[in-house]
Image (cartoon, rainbow, N blue to C red):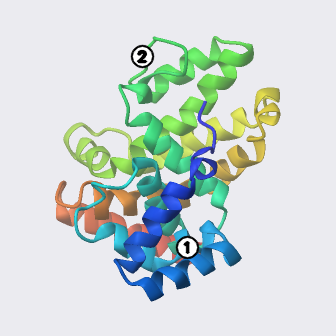
Amino acid sequence: MILPTIRSSFDRADARFIIWLLTRGSEAEREREETRLREEGLDVILDDPRTLNALLAGSRFSSARPELVFYVLVRHALLESDVADTGVADYLAGLISAFGRGGRAYHIADDSTEYRYLVDIMAAAEQSEGRRAFMLRAHIGEFALWLSGLFPDHITSRVHRRAAPPLSYYEELGSAGYRQAARFDEAEQHGIAELYRNCAEFFPVLRVALNRVSDRHLFPATGDRIDRLLRQVADSFNQTLET
């Protein structure tokens, strides 16, 4: 289970680093940003487009804490889709951070059993009870969002080569996983039931936001360019219809 805890981990060192990025040695600018930090808080500075641009410039994140980078990238991608909830950005940044380590994407916490396909996680969830059933259903949502959000080009290429399930398949199963997980008492106990319900309702929007992070920053030069363009156009069109 992944909890939205990255944002609360930001400390004075992270704030000083962001201010340094924004001011680059200008004493007057530094004083101005520190005043803004004291009066308006770190969230205002993290949401500033200049912060994203400063992180993207130069050494490409090499000196930044990974969790800080993930949060800023996800937060600004979500803001493009008018998703203003910082909790959602926090959660998605945590998902990227956790699933990027040591095969964590392929098993639930405290369990060594690996699941490479959504159908296998679903089958295990149907055969489980209690906390394990909750964890597996949450993992269905998280795994579907991880795959469709960060690796859409891979999914599209498998559709062409093997007639594999399209992105809509991941959206459907991921939404269902989150919706079912939100009904468990464990979700209420950990304060994430509403978060899961939001992930279920807005799964396609979250998937597109993560696609932006993947396309622009993580894998900008991979995949078929025509397929990527078609996906982006289709997503833009679908979001226009929904607004």
Above or below residue 6? Residue 123 is above
User: In x, y percent, where is residue 234?
Assistant: 40, 69
- Residue 58 or 168: which is nearer the viewer? 58
Q: In the image shown, does 51 or 170 lie closer to the viewer?
A: 51
Give the answer, above or below, for where 136 lies relative to 43: above
Give the image quarter of residue 24.
bottom left
Residue at image location 31% in from the left, 58% down from the top: 61
Q: Identify the residue position indicated by label 2 in the image.
A: 114
Q: Quadrant of the C terminus?
A: bottom right
Q: Is residue 11 visible?
A: yes
**Residue 117 visible in this rendered orientation of the protein:** no
Q: Residue at x 34, y 51 (%)?
A: 152
In the image, is 182 to the left or to the right of 74?
A: right
Task: From the viewer's perspective, tell me whether residue 90 is left or right of residue 209.
Answer: right
Q: Position of residue 203 (x, y in %)?
A: 57, 53
Residue furthest bottom as drawn: 28
